[in-house]
Amino acid sequence: MHDLQTIFQDYLNYCSLQKKLSSKTLKAYTIDLNQFLAFSSETPDPFERTHLTTYIRSLSQQYKPKSAKRKVAALKAFCSYLVYEDILKLHPFSKIRTSFREPALLPKTIPLDTIQTLLKTTYHIKEDSHLTAKQHCHILRDIAVLELLFATGIRVSELSFLKPEDINFTDKTLKIYGKGARERILYIENPDVIEALQVYKKAFRSEMKSCGFFFINNWGTRYSEQSVRNMIRKYTNLAGCSLHITPHMFRHSFATLLLEEDVDIRYIQNLLGHSSVTTTQIYTHISANKQRKILADKHPRNRILKE
């Protein structure tokens, strides 16, 4: 076996330069695979079946199923690379079964009336005559962020890295680079959302030009994912909402509410940028109100009259 540490570094370069994986994914791969290398430091053959099953068992004992599953997935991907580079003759996981029982965690959503309250609060604050020019600009940005999160179901990381050229106001389109550098185009059809984005862009045009990103923070640089989380927390408190709201909950709400409006799940899959409809199908389990309505309105039993 070649020097594993060197091969590992080559693999990270491959993931970065050829697969175009995000810095977040690369960081996770680095942590997970370094853990495997440390575990295997005294082993003559780290890809021997018994050693791998021992490692997987240790992960299941130390971590929650989701984390253990991620670490094994990272190792499997690394092994695929080793086979591709002819460093390994056979994929070591071809005869290893891995199964981590995960609890069914349903995505948390925001009630529509709460979203309405949150947006109303921000628009009301915008009209405050006591705001300084700088404060007024900041709330224009925050309104644009909230509107875009709900209008498109965009991931907070995707939103944070948007560039001015990604939004076409003529066609009302939004170009998004999602996971695995997959590109998708979304349409923004609500006039209030378009107006919020246009007003914000007018206020921050010069900052966008110098920074290169669409959403700008108070210091003239990219509006980070953590800044978005802090901003949502701020307006949630101002709106008097008891619910703890995160950016990703806007994405869950976007998908769930569309599903309850009878939008085909394949369309929702494309809008969310999921590579597999299996990922999207989690939303089919949370439309309890929709299920009740279907059974109340559509079930044939309702047409049978008692004599």
Image: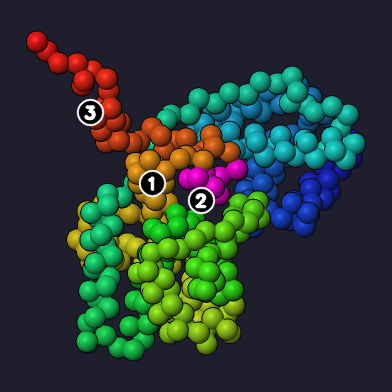
Q: Is residue 211 left or right of residue 12?
A: left
- Residue 126 lies, in percent from the top left, at 27, 78
Q: Is residue 186 left or right of residue 114?
A: right
Q: Which residues are magenta?
A: 267-275
Instruction: Quarter of the image for the C terminus: give it.
Output: top left
Report crowding for label 2: few under 14, some 14 to 19, many 20 or more residues within 10 A (C-alpha).
some
Residue under pointer 3: 296
Callout 2, which amino acid? Leu
Q: Is residue 82 above or below residue 11?
A: above
Marks 2 & 1, CB-CB < 8 Å contact: yes
Number of the label disc, if any, that sits on residue 271? 2
Q: Quadrant of residue 42?
A: top right
Residue under pointer 1: 258
Classify mark 2: helix, strand or loop. Answer: helix
Residue at coordinates 27% horizontally, 23% vertically from top-left?
299
Instruction: Quarter of the image for the N terminus: give it.
Output: top right
- Residue 136 lies, in percent from the top left, at 33, 83
How far apart are labels 2 and 1 at the CA level?
11 Å
Number of the label disc, if any, that sits on residue 224? none
Q: Is residue 51 above or below residue 195?
A: above
Q: Name the N-terminal-most of marks 2 and 3.
A: 2
- Residue 280 lies, in percent from the top left, at 49, 39
Callout 3, which amino acid? Ala
Q: Name the N-terminal-most of marks 2 and 1.
A: 1
Instruction: Reply yes or no: does residue 73 show up in magenta.
Output: no
How far apart are labels 2 and 3 at the CA level?
30 Å
